Image (cartoon, grey):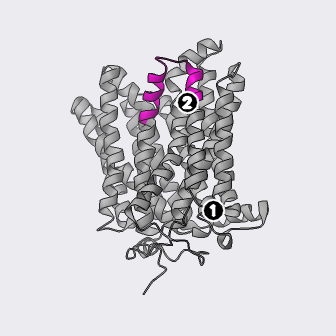
Amino acid sequence: MRTTADGCGAARGSSTAVAVPAAPRESLRLVLMLGALVALGPFTIDMYLPALPTISGELHTTSTAVQLTLTGTLAGLGLGQLVLGPLSDSVGRRRPLLAGTTVHVGASLLCAVAPNVAVLGVLRVLEGLGAAAASVVAIAVVRDLFTGVRAARMISRLVLVIGASPVLAPTIGGEMLRWTDWRGVFLALAVLGLGVTVMAAIALPETLPPARRRTGGVPATLHTYAGLLTDRTFVALVLVAGLNASALFAYVAGSSFVMQDEFGLSEHAFSLVFAVNSVANIGASQVNVLLLSWFQPARILVASLATAVVSSGTLLVVALTGAGGLFGLLAPLFVLLGAIGLTGPNVSALGLSLHGEAAGTAAALFGSLNLGLGALAAPVVGVLGNDSVAMATVMAGGAALAATVLLLGVRLRVLWSMDLAEPEPVGALPAA
């Protein structure tokens, strides 16, 4: 008998279902499409990073001013998700997605001809806003089609793209600078945005039927946010996801200083260490797909947070004492990054399953808080000294706070009630 269990309680407001991709080829097509959508944000953030010194010189400005263009992109991504998530709950997924990616293309083209850093900064905000549509709609589509274990599996596959993109984007940008300038990098981003737009227009069908859309305009949107923010369990899971992301951002912000300045690694050696640690983080998210065949997301979440607390505590002790030298630091760091990679997909799947009727808005809160807490964690590492102790302190703090929030914010009875048998799909990917 077909059930409607969603792995975390029945999905509210999901009486009208759409089909789930059953054929492997169709599932692969969906993963590739959503992967392209979620990659747009990281590529927009990171692809131009190798050109920052050049931009500073050509536009006759300071390095601080140029770095603010990166802050503008992050602000655009965060604010864009908060606006476009609820909008996609009201009008469907395709229209906000296509409008956003079109804005991204236009902003990227204008960035390529920006005459000064002030104009570039404004355009980078718009570029981030456009990329936000791709990010938030991709996660909302996952919740439209899947829930519970299936959603966690799909998000794990997308984490592979999210994790690999920040590593690949600066490398690709750096290679491009060998035969073009920074303006050419923005032209490449415009081409990428155009490709995503065309792909979505042709191949990605509408996954939110009219019967499941929310109406009421701005008051309804505010009411939806109020409802989400008064759901104790949902808020706790969003905070856990954000604190988990803050630990990862602390590593990204501090690792180059720790490895190169403190331990004397060359740029090449650091890039190899960074790549190995990226394998831990990205690989764990893919191992999660296998673990979900035996364990429910809530069980994996508890285990991964416990591992993060122990490994981050070990990392902090090693940083404070210097025990084991570089290897002593890298060993717990590798385990910690793996635990972070396991936590993300499962906490997101559990949180999104609580509010299937407002998947876009819920995904927006997850995305914007991840960016917000991550953006706060990065400068804290610098303020504390940009050394191994500073990095380990912020990472350990993020892990400990995440575990505490889960323990105090989600009642044990509620957490284990999310541990249901693998659910039936919400429905099937409509024919394009």
Whether residue 228 appears in magenta in the rendering, the answer is: no
Q: Residues within 10 Å of mark 2 (few under 14, many from 20)?
A: some
Looking at this view, is 225 or 137 the one in front? 137
Q: Is residue 312 visible?
A: no
Q: Which residues are magenta?
A: 167-188
The residue singled out by tag 1 in the image is 229
Q: Tell whether 125 sits left or right of 387.
A: right
State how far apart marks 1 and 2 are (Cα). Answer: 39 Å
The quadrant holding residue 140 is bottom right
Amino acid type, callout 1? Leu
Query: Can you give x and y, in whole percent of width and height, for residue 117 in the image?
Result: 68, 21
Helix, strand or loop at mark 1: helix
Looking at the image, which residue is at 47% across and 65% down?
350
The quadrant holding residue 228 is bottom right
User: Which mark is drawn over residue 88?
Assistant: none
- Count of numbered circles in the view: 2
Looking at the image, which residue is at 47% across and 74% down?
6
Q: Is residue 340 above or below residue 412?
A: above
